[in-house]
Amino acid sequence: MKAKDAKTREFSAAGPGVQRISGPNGTRYRIRFATAAGRKSLTTSSLDEALRIRNAVLVELAAGNMAAAGGITIRAYSQEILDRREANGYRNGRTDRGRIKKYVLRTHYADWPLRAFSRKHAVRWVRWLGTHPIKRQTRIHCVNMMRVIFGEALNDGLVDENPLVGVRVQGADPRTESTWTVLSLPEQLRLVSGIDTPEKWIVAVAETSGLRQGELWGLELSDVHLDADVPYITVRYGAPGRKPTKSGSIRDVPLIGIGLEGMREWMAIRDQWCHRPRLTELVFPLQKGSARDRKAPRNFRRWLSDAGIHRRVRWHDLRHTAASSLISGDWGRAWSLEEVREMLGHADIRTTQRYAHFARKALFRAAEETNAIHT
């Protein structure tokens, strides 16, 4: 009987993913789809119901709640890894999510199973990144993040190899000038002296300590040691909320020059300046008592303009300024690259070496002093 029925059935498409089956017992509709768990088939007597099921399956696949054939998708797994990293206290979670969303999840690779993405596709994706008007460092961050994602997939047994291993971003950004700015010593002094609010002392600390913005905003009262023989601060956190530093390590940073003066002045007026000083342990909260976000102080651009500094200067450039002044000897003895590396918290001396050209100023000052002795 079954064989006879099969011969009299007619099959036709009733829409993408839906098959109409017409036979002696009436018309039914079959929905077929493939997932990591294997091929699935559902049958219903209603076309509307079949289409509703088909659409629900597509939504679940796109959301990553159901693994497509071949295993979990890049879209679903990347979100899982980003969540996992944030739960483990990794910094820059929001930035990483933004890069993955813009340069991975908007590509056709996003809904591919992890196992389908090979080294060939990784190379093509990196080349595609190169067609976008973004900085080389941004492309490097994207590739590194994808390498981390597939590294975790390898550890979880979802892929047999990491296709991003050995894939590098080629070339360099065309530059005619430095991508960052440093302030001369007169500019540093002029900037601080021209600010008419207590926040001038925050600027003084920033341009001499070399702390990253998040480290400065995450600094807590217990980590300020003004009574030590050499006053210093302990950089324990990379952002408010006690997030780890970029290198994952804790370092002590001595206070020097106007930075030492600035920290003393700030600590003396902090509780009067902040409306709710007892509600936070942060050294540099907003005036209302809450933590600062990832932005520079609101009036930073106006302060620069008032000081006669009209070129582009970011808050992060105060960190570069601190390094250049130390190497140049602006605050006294010229510091070595190794000493500046310790001060800034670089994990690798090669990062500090980008400031090496500032040593020329100290070199010529030393030569001038030597010549003065022998003339």
Image (spheres, grey):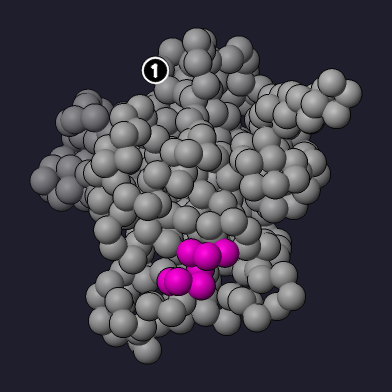
Residue at 58% over, 45% down: 322
Q: Could you tell me which quadrant the C terminus lies in?
A: top right
Q: In the image, what residue occupies the spot 61% across and 20% down?
A: 169
The quadrant in which residue 233 appears is bottom right
Where residue 140 sits in the image (x, y, percent)?
Answer: 57, 29
In the shown orientation, is residue 289 left or right of residue 334? left
From this viewpoint, is residue 2 visible? no
Query: Which residue occupies the foreground of this view, 159 or 205?
Result: 205
Residue 364's x, y, as percent? Answer: 74, 24
Residue 356's place in the image compared with 317, above or below, is above
Image check: 284 left or right of 146?
left
> In the image shown, does 8 or 84 lie closer to the viewer?
84
Q: Position of residue 146 (x, y in %)?
A: 57, 37
Q: Is residue 261 left or right of residue 334?
A: left
Q: Which residue is mark 1?
A: 133
Compared to residue 327, the image places residue 202 above or below, namely below
Magenta range is 260-266
